[in-house]
Image: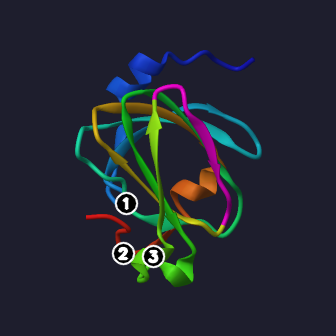
Amino acid sequence: MSSITNIKEALAQAKKDESVGISIATLSSGQDFCLFCTEIPKGHKVGCRYHIEGDEIYSILSGEGVIYTAAPDKIEDANSINFRPVVAGDNFTIPAGVVHQLKASSDMVLLFICPQSHLNSDRVIVPSLTT
């Protein structure tokens, strides 16, 4: 065990990721994946994106919102956009290659696990799936 990180302390020091519009804190990191946390204010939506390699696993700790997903070649077709409400306690996986965007309908705190590359080199930003 290398270190212990407190989620509340990490969130207080989270750094803004301008490309997706949220502050992100690293809680733990490994060779193949990292554990991150973020707070999303009510009404805010995370930048819409997808990743070429690796899945993302989400765990909603508090709050509620909607997760929007689509295939990269279907984001202009409103009938091809999937959406599902999420609430505290929900956990879900976004596979590689799936466009995704989370919108908070109340203040939300969540954890997500993904490769470090999802925050820098493996991120394709696309137009929003929601208004």
* Contact, mark 2 vs mark 1 (Cβ under 8 Å): no
- Element carrying mark 2: loop
**Residue tagged by mark 3?**
79
Task: Name the foreground residue: 45 vs 22.
Answer: 45
Image vertical order of residue 14 relative to residue 20, above or below: above
For residue 9, side relative to residue 97 (left or right): left
- The question of residue 95 being in magenta is answered with yes
Tell me the quarter of the image containing the N terminus: top right
The kind of secondary structure element at disc 1 is loop
Which residue was labeled with disc 1? 47
29 in relation to 94, above or below: above
Residue 91 falls in image quadrant: top right
Q: Position of residue 89 (x, y in %)?
A: 53, 26
The image shows a total of numbered marks equal to 3
Q: Characterize the local packing of mark 1: few (<14), some (14-19) or many (20 or more) Cα atoms within 10 angstroms.
A: many
Disc 3 vs disc 1: which is toward the camera? 3
Q: Which residues are magenta?
A: 88-96
Taking the view exactly as shown, the residue that stands out farthest to the front is 79
Screen quadrant of the C terminus: bottom left
- Residue 5: x and y, percent? 54, 18
Q: Callout 1, which amino acid?
A: Gly
3 or 2: tag closer to the N-terminus: 3
Q: Amino acid at mark 3?
A: Asn
- Residue that appears at 76% across and 46% down: 32
Q: CA distance from mark 3 to mark 1?
A: 20 Å
Residue that numbered label 2 is attached to: 127
Q: Nearer the viewer, residue 121 or 46?
A: 46
Helix, strand or loop at label 3? It is helix
Expressed as whole percent of the image width and height from the top left, the position of residue 77 reads 43, 82
Query: Mark 3 or mark 1: which comes first in sequence?
Result: 1
